[in-house]
Amino acid sequence: MHVESRSMGGEGVQQAAQRSRMYRLFAEALEYPDEDLLGAIRSGALAGALADGLAAVDPALAAAVDRDALADAGEDDALEVEYTRLFDVGLSGPPCPLYGGLYGGARMQTMEEAVRFYNYFGLTLAGEPRELPDHVITELEFLHYLAYREAEALERGEDPGPFQRAQRDFVERHPGRWVPKLRERLERQEAMRFFPALVRALERFLAHVHAHLAREASS
């Protein structure tokens, strides 16, 4: 589910396009920290992109960003080791899984519902081992696509409602439901501060998006 955003005019269009970019940026930031991502963290480029992007959505979101924490990758391979500890390993599974279906409820039903969302908009998963329907990156890529389509509809003078309502409902039923629980687990694990700061920023962004789109739907 890969879509590239392009330049679009109009306030509503720009807001939707900015949300699309932010979904993608959070998805990229939650990848395993390879050399490129570590470079972006240590240089402050990721923290700056997140803060600037969130400010374009709502200045209050940027004000709450912990730039210092988002630029702290620790020494040597500390962040890679921490990513594996938190998200990939554990005797009964990792302590902070990135799969929404593992945060209460029936995982199979959660994944089936997510797939129905994807299929309704003509999307299928790529078949990569990581890309299960309830993985946070899969969910954020889907929201990126919906916001991109919303921006396109607005630019063309078409009804953006289906894409706005889908974002609202998907955020509420999927990442908006479980990302706060992920943040709580990260805090209990006393994780390296980069990860709680990142997930806390994502949690606030999703809450803002849901509230904004709920207002749009009722207006």
Image: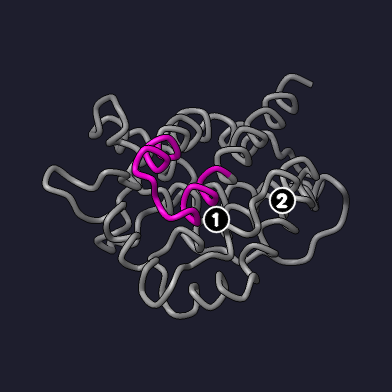
Local crowd size for mark 1, using a 10 Å CA cut-off: few (<14), some (14–19), many (≥20): many
Left/right of residue 42 with respect to residue 49 in the rendered view: left
For label 2, the residue is 54
Q: Residue at x 49, y 45 (%)?
A: 121
Image vertical order of residue 109 relative to residue 4, above or below = above
Quadrant of the frame with the C terminus: top right
Q: What's the amino acid at mark 2? A: Leu
Q: Residue at x 42, y 35 (%)?
A: 184
- In the image, farthest residue toward the left: 91
Q: Is 21 in front, or is 156?
A: 21
Asked whether residue 190 is drawn in magenta, I would say yes
Q: Measured from the top left, where is residue 174 in percent x and y? A: 44, 34
Highlighted range, magenta: 182-200
SS for callout 1: helix
CA gap, disc 1 to disc 2? 11 Å
Indicate the quadrant where residue 113 lies.
top left
Q: Earlier in the sequence, mark 1 or mark 2?
A: 1
For label 1, the residue is 26
User: How was the colour assigned to the protein in this rendering?
Assistant: one colour
Q: Residue at x 42, y 63 (%)?
A: 31
Left/right of residue 147 with respect to residue 74 in the rendered view: right
SS for callout 2: helix
Query: Of helix, strand and loop, which mostly describes the magenta segment?
Result: helix
Left/right of residue 187 with respect to residue 112 in the rendered view: right
Q: Measured from the top left, where is residue 55 in percent x and y? A: 78, 50
Q: What's the amino acid at mark 1? A: Phe
Q: Measured from the top left, where is residue 214 in percent x and y? A: 67, 25
Local crowd size for mark 2, using a 10 Å CA cut-off: few (<14), some (14–19), many (≥20): many
Left/right of residue 159 with respect to residue 202 in the rendered view: right
Image vertical order of residue 58 relative to residue 89, above or below = above
